[in-house]
Amino acid sequence: MMIKENLFPVASDLPQTVKIPKINGRILIDGQILNSGFPSRTVTSPCSLRSEKDGSLYYPELGTTPQVPEEIFMQAVDAASRAWAKGRGEWPSARMEDRINAISALRDQILKHRESISRLLMWEIAKTWTDAQAEFDRTITYMNDTIEATKQLDRDCSRIQFVDQIMAQVRRSPLGVTLCMGPFNYPFNETFTTLIPALILGNTIVVKLPRFGQLLWDFLLEPFRDCLPPGVINVVNGVGREIINPAVKSGKIDVLAFIGSSQVANQIKQSHPMPHRFRSILGLDAKNPAVILPDADLDLSVNECVRGTLSFNGQRCTALKMILVHRSVSKSFIEKFAARVDQLTCGLPWDPGVMITPLADRNKPQQLQSYMKEVVDRGGRLCNPTNGGKMLGSLFFPAVLSGVPLDARLAQEEQFGPLVPIVEFDQISEVEDYVLNSQYGMQASVFGREPKSVGHLVDFLSNQVCRINLNSQCQRGPDVFPFTGRKNSAEGTLSVTDALRSFSIRSMVAARQDPVGKQVIQGVLDGDTSRFLTTNIVL
Ligand code: G3H
């Protein structure tokens, strides 16, 4: 493993371009940005620095983040309720064209903060500089694609249909107050993949910030305030278990957009007084397996599995979290894989060529070590013993473990970190049993070429997971493809177009195709008296 010399610099040695940010996080409620009147807590970076005084390591302070109590959180919910106004608010009843223009203006404002938001991603969650910029750019692309998809949806819905003597126009209408909670691994992008479709279709929003990746949101408050009517979007932060359940229990939240753990999602859903009125769009845990068949191209498989397991330190819901390799090729695969892992550069996110960076969750290294210990105690083998599994601050050097017992926690639970379990199999039925018994069903990767075995596995997996990647790692993108899962892995589907469906419901106007019906509809269209019943389109 390539460990950079002088891994943790002193602050004064940081490159010019890597200044430590200082942000005192604010909140946005009902169009007002507030910087006081609520408790805050200090935010430190997981990227350790070395003290100039005595050389000890410390986590540098980046600023403070709001920790609002329940009553302030409820003020945000009430502001979103007023902006929704039982569906009669300015935003939910605006013409599509007006909402598209507002979201386009929002995008233009946010674009001005590319550098600052990317830098905060680097400092707050230790995302490499390249990946941080990619997260920003991907989000802007998602906004552009959503704008175009909304225009297309509007065109598709603008026509009047004639069926069995009924004339009808079918459109998609908003659902209500939406609580958006994104994950810490993509705190900007994944929150926006729910926020933007929900907004553009006329829902009103409360954003509760992710566990890490909070300070970057401060750059978004002015753009939100300036581009959207008051209360349409409210941004607050606090301790989830203290503020979310009471808010959901109030019955004032209609939609939950949550990317995080299935355990938390269950708790939140159970708090709603009328669950049938609570729409959920969820991206949850996963345990995506890679299956290496006897005829797999091993170099390609190793390459894809290294990226699949260890990109952003394995902190992706779509990461490969279990490798099942046929015994006939396992020795060679494991040797090549462990050697490649040992060549990865570990360091700080601004170091050129770095792949492994500190973990955002300061408790994660201990949890990973306890997974490792259980496997090794039960006869598993650490395949890269020189540095694998060592800890330095919140940096955890990736460890490759073979011979992992199938009932070990590492084989069953989502590790969400740089720990790679490998299990050998003889019969494909062993792979099938593992997948059938898994609590998760997001994606899988199959490495092999022989059509009969690949075809068989594709058919088996297609009823177990929602994306099968052939000879390539698991991944969400391109974002126009459906992103979803079975079992504990998801509810609803996110893609540019699916998200527009998820955050809306179809409403229609229908009339008999007789002289009275035709006259009324024609009158409304000619007089342009309805925002809903109209054949005007957004160009
Ligand atoms: O963490 C889940 C993300 O949606 C994964 O996206 O596959 O593009 O890294 P990605």
Image: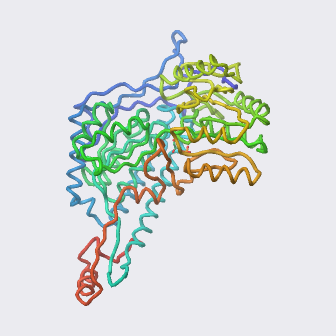
Where residue 486 sits in the image (x, y, percent)? Answer: 49, 47
Look at the picture and state if 449 lies above or below 433: below
Where residue 409 sits in the image (x, y, percent)? Answer: 55, 26
**In which image quadrant can residue 481 be found?**
bottom right
Look at the picture and state if 43 lies above or below 228: above
**In which image quadrant can residue 522 be found?**
bottom left
How many badges with numbers are in the image? 0
User: If the image is split into quadrants, where does the N terminus sit?
Assistant: top right
Look at the picture and state if 282 lies above or below 60: below
Residue 46 or 78: which is nearer the viewer? Answer: 78
User: If the image is split into quadrants, where does the C terminus sit?
Assistant: bottom left
**In which image quadrant can residue 334 be found?**
top right
Where residue 267 sits in the image (x, y, percent)? Answer: 34, 36
Residue drawn at x 57%, y 32% as measured from the top left:
349
333 relative position to 507: left or right: right
Residue drawn at x 61%, y 45% as measured from the top left:
444
471 relative position to 359: left or right: right
